[in-house]
Image: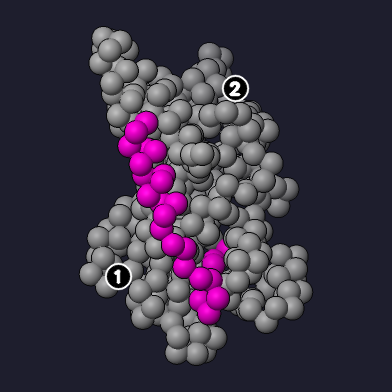
């Protein structure tokens, strides 16, 4: 039986081919589909033959374990048998306290602010002592922050903050810990996003940071090949309802950013966009989380595969929708085949913005 991921890929390919090549004769289309399905079946069977590496004796450092994906991954990797260095911005927060309750002796909770060179250096020194000369098998750059707002409305402070966490933070941590990962010929796993492959309106700062993280991952993958280090991107789809990205704490932070955007905007911009534009967008984005999965299990499975498979995939675009197909993942696939004008239409249809207000303030 094909694994779930392979079956999903078949569905994606069928959708793409039927959309992009509908003009082909049925016999040609059928032949292409058969070849595509055959290739996926072969790849899936090959991957099943690959022996998984043992987790025991291997150490993985994860950034952003306070909540969401990082917290869930730390718990999962402990169950798999890894030693986990779980870094948190707040080591006295709920997530850190729960992780500290683990009595296996294989979890170490360390404070880390990915935007601070000093904090990264202190974390590195502690991690090196924990590894005891054995090196670091895995580095998972997960820490991230979400933000929204049109480019015209987003303040420079917001741009800088998002890029500093989501992109420069990944670079800062990676540069510090590369020697430990290279020692083991291990893995670097960067959590990017489907929004790092297909841009959405009203997510300028976030799109930019994730596109940058994708470019970093591709560059580093090529540079590290000669050292035997594998560099992998995990690109979550619509998991907003299963993570902390849109929880109460983050929503309050977003509302503060909205207030900053409103106070920093010109009268002309406020008139153009309308008084309640940002409120509408926040409501729409939070409503979109109701169509996401209720858990992050598929993501955790992909992380485990990335860290234990002898031949991991270079990237894992993980389906997160609560329905059969995740439109966010589909759009990233279609991007490679559809004309830009048609892709723009689909993005605006499914992830667009309210119609422009005709009346002023």
Choose between 242 and 84: the one closer to the eye.
84
Q: Residue at x 74, y 78 (%)?
A: 103
| Residue at numbered disc 1 | 228
SS assignment at label 1: loop
Q: Residue at x 63, y 33 (%)?
A: 322
> How many neighbours does mark 1 have within 10 angstroms: few (below 14), some (14-19), or many (20 or more)?
some
SS assignment at label 2: loop
- Where residue 213 appears, as percent x and y from the top left, is 38, 54
Q: Which marked residue is nearer to the observer: mark 1 or mark 2?
A: 1
Choose between 114 and 33: the one closer to the eye.
33
Q: Residue at x 34, y 33 (%)?
A: 38
Residue 83 horizontal side relative to residue 345, left or right: right
- Where residue 77 appears, as percent x and y from the top left, is 60, 66
Magenta run includes residue 58 = yes
Q: Is residue 71 above or below residue 298?
A: below
Choose between 9 and 182: the one closer to the eye.
9
Residue 126 horizontal side relative to residue 184, left or right: right
- Give the position of the C terminus as an image quadrant: top right
- Where residue 70 appears, as percent x and y from the top left, is 60, 60
Q: Quadrant of residue 196?
A: top left
- Where residue 290 appears, as percent x and y from the top left, is 68, 33
Q: Is residue 291 above or below residue 224?
A: above
Spatial distance from mark 1 to mark 2, Cα to Cα? 59 Å
* Disc with the residue nearer the chain's start (1 vs 2): 1
The magenta segment is 37-66
Q: Residue at x 27, y 58 (%)?
A: 219
| Residue at numbered disc 2 | 361
């Amino acid at each position: 039986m094909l694994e779930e991921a392979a079956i999903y890929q078949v569905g994606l390919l069928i959708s793409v081919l039927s959309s992009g090549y509908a003009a082909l004769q049925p016999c040609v289309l059928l032949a292409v589909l058969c070849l595509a399905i055959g290739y996926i079946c072969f790849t899936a069977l090959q991957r099943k033959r690959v022996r998984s590496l043992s987790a025991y004796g291997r150490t993985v450092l994860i950034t952003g374990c306070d909540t969401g994906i990082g917290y869930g991954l730390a718990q999962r990797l402990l169950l798999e048998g890894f030693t986990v260095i779980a870094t948190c911005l707040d080591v006295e927060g709920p997530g850190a306290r729960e992780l500290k309750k683990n009595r296996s002796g294989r979890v170490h909770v360390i404070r880390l602010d990915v935007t601070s060179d000093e904090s990264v250096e202190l974390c590195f020194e502690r991690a090196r002592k924990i590894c005891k000369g054995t090196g670091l098998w895995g580095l998972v750059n997960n820490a991230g922050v979400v933000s929204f707002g049109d480019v015209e409305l987003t303040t420079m402070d917001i741009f800088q903050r998002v890029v500093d966490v989501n992109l420069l933070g990944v670079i800062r941590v990676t540069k510090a810990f590369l020697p430990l990962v290279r020692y083991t010929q291990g893995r670097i796993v960067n959590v990017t996003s489907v929004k790092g492959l297909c841009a959405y309106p009203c997510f300028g700062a976030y799109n930019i940071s994730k596109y940058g993280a994708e470019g970093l991952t591709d560059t580093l993958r090529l540079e590290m090949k000669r050292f035997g280090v594998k560099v992998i991107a995990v690109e979550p789809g619509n998991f907003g309802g299963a993570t902390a990205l849109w929880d109460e704490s983050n929503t309050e932070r977003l509302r503060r950013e909205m207030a900053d955007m409103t106070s920093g905007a010109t009268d002309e911009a406020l008139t153009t966009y309308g008084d309640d534009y940002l409120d509408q967008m926040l409501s729409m984005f939070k409503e979109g989380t109701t169509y996401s999965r209720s858990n992050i299990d598929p993501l955790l499975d992909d992380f485990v595969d990335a860290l234990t498979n002898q031949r991991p995939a270079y990237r894992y675009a993980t389906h997160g929708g609560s329905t059969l197909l995740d439109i966010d993942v589909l759009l990233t696939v279609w991007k490679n085949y559809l004309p830009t004008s048609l892709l723009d239409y689909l993005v605006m249809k499914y992830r667009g913005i309210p119609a422009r207000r005709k009346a002023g303030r």
